[in-house]
Amino acid sequence: MSDSPYFEDVNIGDELPSLSKVITTGMLVRYAGASRDFSPLHYDQEWANENNVWGGIIAHGMVKTTFTAQLLTDWAGPSGTVREMKCYYRGPDKPGDTVMIRGKVVNKLEKDGEHLAEVDTEVVGTEERITTPGHAVVVLPSREHPDERPSLVRLLSDEARAKRVGSILGEQYMEADQIQAHMGIPWTPYTAHVDSTWITMFAEATEDFNPLYTDPEYSKNSLHGGVIAPPTFLAALDPSYRRGRASAKPEPNVAPNTAKGGGNGWDEFHWYSPVRPGDTITAYGQWKEVYDKTGRSGALRFLVREIEYENQRRELVARSQGAVVRII
């Protein structure tokens, strides 16, 4: 399929075509519905004014990570894919802001039979502030090895799965000391069925109209052989959010996504297989580690979660990590 750059034609220092996005309250509301992240910080002006040191509604960190994923998938085209991505949340972006998403190739390599480009990324907000820097690894087609399609399918063993099944909720909406008490204890797995409507809803929430997510005819000739979900769709399956439970607005001193309580520090993904319509995905998670660091806001505590996503074929779809940050 055309419209994908060949590995051999990409050079270190190449800049990806930039992507411009206008953040609106409507976009954040749509994303909240599609991702089931109902933190009032992202849609409730009164609540955000009272509880957010940045003053009012701000965009989800994962919205900006999703923008970054769109930049990468648009560049990789139908014959490429994003293998890894990490984004750091260094500053807020708000409704009304126009942000630019940029990327630059910083390395090329061959690994496990794949032809890879490493890309430094950034989301640039108002006054040219880099609010969300990151790094990604993108799989590209090779002109010299056009039929090379290495399989990264991994299966979770029964033993590995059993170790990941627990009985506690992986809530972010707890005090830091409560989360610390749960370090290393598996959460109750979260399972959800994925359909094409949900995938379309997620993609359109951030105005990503890539036909890989909606058009069976177009996508059948792609690397994936059919319709897939956007890479960051897995954020909708993260058990640490109050999925579908918008009923209880978190108290100001408990909510992780406020400056009084903290925020999200970074998110990282490593993908092995795409999510497809009809898949049933189970997420196994736990709080992995805690560490302290001094930042511009003072003393900070980082609480790191780790999640593995498995489909109904018992294939490992992806691994992710992310940090909840609390001011201490």
Image (cartoon, rainbow, N blue to C red):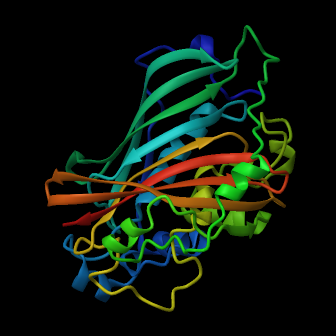
Query: Which is more toward the observer, 293 or 266?
Result: 293
Query: Which is more toward the observer, 47 or 10?
Result: 47
Location of residue 1 with respect to 258 vertically, above or below = above
Residue at the far top in the pictured view: 144
Q: Residue at x 51, y 72 (%)?
A: 241
Name the spot of residue 40 as percent of width and height, x first. 40, 81
Query: Which is more toward the observer, 282 or 160?
Result: 160
Q: Is residue 229 visible?
A: no
Which quadrant of the rendered structure holds the N terminus?
A: top right
**322 sits to left or right of 283:** left
Location of residue 100 with respect to 256 vertically, above or below = above
Q: Residue at x 55, y 15 (%)?
A: 109
Q: Is residue 50 visible?
A: yes
Location of residue 192 with respect to 77 vertically, above or below = below
Name the spot of residue 229 as percent of width and height, x first. 70, 53
Name the spot of residue 249 as percent of width and height, x first. 41, 88
Residue at the far bottom in the pictured view: 247
Which quadrant of the rendered structure holds the C terminus?
A: bottom left
**282 sits to left or right of 269:** right
Name the spot of residue 174 as percent of width and height, x first. 39, 77
**207 sits to left or right of 263:** right
Q: Residue at x 60, y 40 (%)?
A: 73
**48 sits to left or right of 228:** left
Count of marks placed on residues: 0
Location of residue 123 with respect to 311 vertically, above or below = above
